[in-house]
Image (cartoon, grey):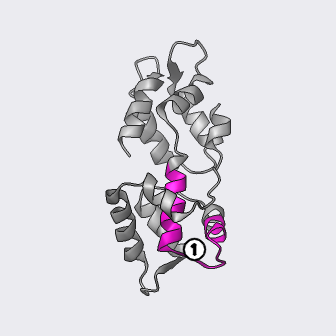
């Protein structure tokens, strides 16, 4: 169920070669551009604040605890190198939900078993199980993206496709 999936996943770092194999050259270039933008001192590494900012630039919403753990997992106490960052991002991306996983999570809240979730239930799930990752505006946008019918039902398979295609 989504209760199990929404919690933060491990951010362990894999060796760089396997990480590089997982990412496209375009993704690596995007990471490099964002990393360089926030490496204002040109040290080749980012502090906790820099890492959090670069991840937000890339569309992620890490908590302070997650950022601290990522830096610790990289083998450092205060910063992260580009190589460790790419490895960590590859690991995070490999653990992202697939359409089947998201649909299975939504199905836990599909009371009638017909492929729909109430918009009010979706709001509640994102608020209660989202660990603060979504603000009110983002929750409204997700619900709107779900295009509820006149009774407030959202076809969650269609929502899943929209969510995954918007990344």
Specify whether residue 52 is in view: no
Neighbourhood count class around disc 1 (C-alpha, 10 Å): few under 14, some 14–19, many 20 upward: many
Instruction: Say whether residue 110 is magenta.
Output: no
Disc 1 target residue: 48
Above or below, 159 relative to 75: above
Specify whether residue 91 is in view: yes
Determine the residue located farthest toward the front in the rendered image: 17
Horizontal side of 94 relative to 12 (left or right) equals left
The x and y percentages for residue 109 are: 61, 24
What main secondary structure does the magenta stretch of the protein show? helix
The x and y percentages for residue 9 are: 63, 50
* Corner quadrant of residue 28: bottom left
The x and y percentages for residue 71 are: 61, 70
Q: What residue is shown at x 52% (from left), y 12% (from top)?
A: 114
Magenta residue span: 68-93
Viewer-nearest residue: 103 or 56? 103
Q: What residue is shown at x 36% (from left), y 54% (from top)?
A: 24
Q: What residue is shown at x 60% (from left), y 44% (from top)?
A: 130
Instruction: Say whether residue 76 is magenta.
Output: yes
Horizontal side of 155 relative to 126 (left or right) equals left
The x and y percentages for residue 99 are: 47, 32
Name the image quarter holding the N terminus.
Answer: top right
Total numbered labels: 1
Horizontal side of 10 relative to 19 (left or right) equals right
* Corner quadrant of residue 164: top left
Q: What residue is shown at x 61% (from left), y 70% (from top)?
A: 74
Please tell me whether mark 1 sits on a helix, a strand or a loop. Answer: helix
Above or below, 167 relative to 91: above
């Amino acid at each position: 169920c989504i209760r199990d999936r929404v919690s933060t996943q491990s951010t362990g770092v894999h060796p760089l070669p396997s990480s590089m194999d997982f990412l496209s050259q375009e993704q690596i270039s995007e990471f490099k551009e964002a990393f360089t933008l926030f490496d204002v001192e040109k040290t080749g590494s980012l502090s906790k604040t820099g890492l959090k900012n670069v991840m937000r630039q890339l569309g992620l919403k890490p908590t302070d605890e997650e950022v601290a753990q990522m830096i610790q997992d990289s083998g450092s106490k205060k910063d992260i190198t580009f190589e460790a960052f790419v490895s960590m991002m590859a690991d995070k991306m490999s653990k992202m939900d697939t359409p089947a996983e998201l649909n299975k999570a939504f199905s836990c809240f599909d009371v009638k078993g017909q492929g729909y979730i109430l918009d009010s239930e979706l709001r509640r799930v994102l608020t209660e199980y989202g660990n603060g990752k979504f603000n009110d505006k983002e929750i409204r946008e997700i619900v709107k993206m779900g295009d509820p019918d006149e009774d407030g039902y959202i076809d969650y398979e269609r929502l899943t496709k929209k969510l995954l295609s918007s990344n």
